[in-house]
Image: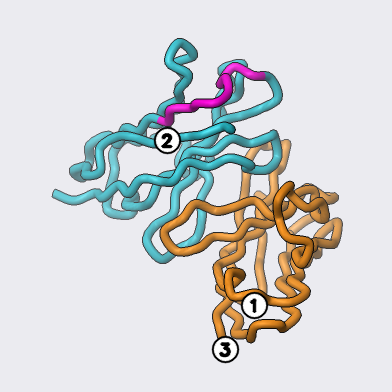
Chain colours: A orange, B cyan
């Protein structure tokens, strides 16, 4: 089964900072990767799909890139509401399973 | 606007069966191109996909849980359900239902906490 490894596991940053989170797949997955934001007590929210497509309504400071095995989520200028946990996720057709990364907690410095 | 709402028992005894239902509103569960999943999150931990049912009724489960999971659909009520048998404390988690379109989860329920305890 394909595994996703996120780095770092946690990150401290300040408002206005540029932040990058990485997700590495154990084997190539083309561009079939999504990113989610989760705040405490809330369901995850889809930010990016197909590695680099911005979900409707998501601020443009969020961007995604990568293909194959290495992917990144970038927040260009952190806002107070961006402090949350971020997860990457992939779908593999054979067998048809979904896998999440272990998460990256973004905290205020 | 599509909405999903989980319901079911919040407390289950060890060795018993966990049962949850996800009611879908604002859209039909029979719409083609989508699958309907259950995902869980133990307290303070990450997300684990449990399984999904496709609009056709086909099901696929996480291999790690496959022997204990059943997902079914009730199209007349526009809802789908999860049964997880032989639960232990390790099954304590917030359980989410979600729609996948089809590779990403674009709509989620708010989640329901299920505690396994005697």
Say which chain tag 2 marks. B
Crowding at mark 1 (Cα within 10 Å: few <14, some 14-19, many 20+): some
Q: Residue at 64% across / 77% down in the picture? A: A8
Q: Position of residue A67 (x, y in %)?
A: 86, 57
- Left/right placement of residue A105 relative to residue A14 reads left
Disc marking residue B63: none
Q: Position of residue A16 (x, y in %)?
A: 71, 82
- Left/right placement of residue A60 relative to residue A10 reads right
Q: Residue at 32% across / 52% down in the picture? A: B92
Report the number of discs.
Answer: 3
In the displayed structure, would residue B9 be above or below residue B111?
above
Q: Earlier in the sequence, mark 3 or mark 1?
A: 1
> In what element is the residue under mark 3?
loop
* Nearer to us in this view, A74 or B115: A74
- The answer to whether residue B107 is seen in the rendering is yes
Bounds of the magenta segment: B22-31
> In what element is the residue under mark 2?
strand
Distance between the Cα atoms at labels 3 and 2?
A: 36 Å
Disc marking residue B5: 2
Per the picture, the main secondary structure of the magenta-coloured stretch is: loop
Q: Find the residue positioned furthest to the bottom.
A: A109
Disc marking residue A8: 1
Q: Residue at 39% across / 57% down in the picture? A: B42
- The answer to whether residue B70 is seen in the rendering is no
The residue pinned by badge 3 equals: A109
In the displayed structure, would residue A97 be above or below residue A23?
above
């Amino acid at each position: 089964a394909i595994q996703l490894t996120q780095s770092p596991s946690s990150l401290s940053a300040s408002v206005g900072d540029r932040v990058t989170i990485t997700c590495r797949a154990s084997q190539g997955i083309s561009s079939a990767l999504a990113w989610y934001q989760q705040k405490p007590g809330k369901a995850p929210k889809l930010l990016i799909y197909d590695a680099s497509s911005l979900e409707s309504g998501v601020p443009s400071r969020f961007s995604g890139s990568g293909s194959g095995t290495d992917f990144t989520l970038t927040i260009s200028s952190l806002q107070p509401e961006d402090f949350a946990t971020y997860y990457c996720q992939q779908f593999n057709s054979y067998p048809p399973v979904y896998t999440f990364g272990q998460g990256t907690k973004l905290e205020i410095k | 606007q599509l909405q999903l709402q989980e319901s079911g028992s919040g407390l289950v005894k060890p060795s018993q069966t966990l049962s949850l239902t996800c009611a879908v509103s604002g859209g039909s569960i029979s719409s083609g191109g989508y699958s309907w999943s259950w995902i869980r999150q133990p307290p303070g931990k990450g997300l684990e996909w449990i399984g999904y049912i496709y609009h056709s009724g086909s099901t696929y489960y996480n291999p790690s849980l496959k022997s204990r999971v059943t997902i079914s659909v009730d199209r007349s009520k526009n809802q789908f359900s999860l049964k997880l048998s032989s639960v232990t404390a390790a099954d304590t988690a917030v359980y989410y239902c979600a729609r996948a379109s089809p590779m990403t989860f674009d709509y989620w329920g708010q989640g329901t906490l299920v505690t396994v305890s005697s």
